[in-house]
Image (cartoon, rainbow, N blue to C red):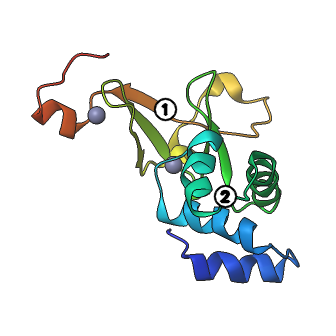
Amino acid sequence: MKMTFEDLSNELKSKNIRLSHQRLKVLEYLVNNRCHPTVDQIYTDLHKEIPTLSKTTVYNTLNTLINADLVKLITIDENETRYDIDTSIHGHFKCESCGSIYDFDINIDSLESKDLDFFKINNKNIYFNGICPKCIKQGNNMAN
Ligand SMILES: [Zn+2]
Ligand SMILES: [Zn+2]
């Protein structure tokens, strides 16, 4: 399910969340760049367009969107937090060669383990890594 900027703005309105012009730009960036960007990526790209934007604003906006369930935080590499505008359950594939992160559809609910019968699960993450088709084509089969 891909939410458009319009969908997301309406969702915010229905939750009584008002975003300033700068904050809407952050949301728009996430909608247009479905590459699971990091805060630095968002800030660096948007700062060119909005010189008055601060990193704090980017952080605060992301937190607002996470609290409103419009953005999901994903940690694929331990030292790297990324943001995902697609909050539906899906898997992530990280290419070891180019570093791109791909979404893939997977029925996570069908994955069960008797070992977890008495556990309360808050979060299910599926993460694969390897080499993406683009890199295989280019012959970059080796991880950097
Ligand atoms: Zn790749
Ligand atoms: Zn994703």
Give the label, 1 or 2, closer to the camera: 2
Q: Residues within 10 Å of mark 1 (few under 14, many from 20)?
A: some
User: What element does badge 2 sit on?
Assistant: loop
> Disc 1 or 2, which lies upstream in sequence?
2
Quarter of the image for residue 85 reads bottom right
Q: Position of residue 143 (x, y in %)?
A: 30, 16
- Between the residue at mark 1 and the residue at mark 2, the CA separation in whole angstroms equals 36 Å
Could you tell me which secondary element the residue under label 1 belongs to? strand
Q: Nearer the viewer, residue 124 or 141?
A: 141
> Where is 18 relative to 99, above or below?
below
Identify the residue shown where x is 16% and y is 31%: 136
Q: Residue at x 46, y 40 (%)?
A: 92
> What is the x, y in percent for residue 59?
77, 48
Amino acid at dot 2: Pro
Q: Amino acid at mark 1?
A: Tyr
Image location of residue 30, percent across then percent down: 57, 60
Q: Quadrant of residue 93?
A: top left
Q: Which mark is residue 51?
A: 2
Which residue appears farthest toward the right when viewing the image? 16
Evaluate if marks 1 and 2 touch, with contact meaning CB atoms under 8 Å apart.
no
* Spot occupied by residue 84 in the image (x, y as percentages of width and height): 59, 51
